[in-house]
Image (cartoon, rainbow, N blue to C red):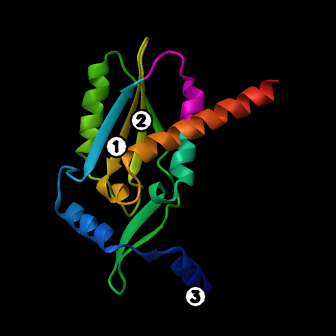
Amino acid sequence: RQRQMCIRDRRTEKASEAEEQIWFEHQQQQHGESQHCFAWTLDSRVDTGRLVNALTLVQQQTGAANLNYDYDDARGLVRRPASVSPGVTIQAIRHERQASEALLRLKETPFDLASTTPLHFYLFIGEEICILGMVVHDILFISLGLPEIVQTVSAFYNCLLYTSDAADE
C-alpha cells in the first residue's frame, strides 16, 4: 500500500497558481461559468469514424486536456493524469437547434474536475446534419488555447487520413 502511494504521488504535481485560482472560482459557481461551448457545422465529406478516433486521441494524448484536479490539504491543488478520458459523446438530432440547446445545457453543468477532464467533445448527427461540439473549462485555456485545440484535432484527423490512405494502397 505504501508503494502504491509513492507511485501515485509521482504522478501528481502541484497545480500552478493560475490553475488554483480558476479551480477555487469554479468551486463557487453553480452554472458552469468557467466553461465554454463551441460548435462547428461539418460538411458531408467528413469521415465521422475517423473524426471520433481523432477526438479520442486528442483527449488521451494532449497532456493538459487529459488531467484531473484534486485539492490536497497538505499540497493545495494538485493535477494528475486522468485515469479515464470522457470519450466522444454522439447524439442523434433532427435540427441544429437541438445541438445548440444540448451544448448550452452541458456548458451550464459544472465539471467535476476530480473525476473528469477539462475538455469534452460531442458529435451531433442528423439526416443531413453533422455538428462538432466542444465544452472546455477555463483551467485548460491556461496552457492550451482554442486555436491549438482545433489545430490538434485537425492534425490527428489528417494523420489518420494519411495512415488510412497508405494502408489502402
Which of the marked residues, 2 or 3, is nearer the chain's N terminus?
A: 3
Q: Is residue 152 above or below residue 25?
A: above
Residue 140 position in % (x across, y down):
37, 56
Gap between marks 1 and 3 measured at Cα: 37 Å
Q: Secondary structure at mark 1?
A: strand
Report the front residue among 57 and 92: 57
The quadrant the N terminus occupies is bottom right
- Disc 2 + disc 3, Cβ < 8 Å: no
- Disc 2 from disc 1: Cα separation: 8 Å
Q: Residue 129 appears in which quarter of the rendering?
A: top left
Q: Is 158 left or right of 36, judged from the image as shown?
A: right
**Is 142 rendered above or below residue 103?**
below
- Report how far apart the C-alphas of labels 2 and 3 lie in the structure: 40 Å
Q: Quadrant of residue 7?
A: bottom right
Asked whether the residues under the numbered discs 2 and 1 touch, taking CB atoms below 8 Å apart as contact, a structural biologist would say: yes
Amino acid type indicated by mark 1: Val
Identity of the residue drawn at 49% across and 41% down = 151
Please tell me which residue is depicted at 65% across the width and 35% down the height of the picture: 160
Who is closer to the viewer here, 61 or 89? 61
x and y percentages locating residue 87 in the rendered image: 50, 44
The reply, left or right, for residue 151 in relation to residue 133 is right
Does residue 53 appear in this view? no
Which numbered marker is on residue 2? 3
Secondary structure state at the residue bearing disc 2:
strand
10 Å neighbourhood of mark 2: few (<14), some, or many (≥20)?
A: many
Q: Which residue is mark 1?
A: 135
**Quarter of the figure with the C terminus:** top right
Asked whether 118 or 146 is in front, the reply is 146
Tell me the mark number nearer the camera, choosing from 1 and 3: 1
User: Which label was assigned to residue 122?
Assistant: 2
Which residue occupies the foreground of this view, 110 or 136?
Answer: 136
| Magenta stretch in the rendered image | 42-53
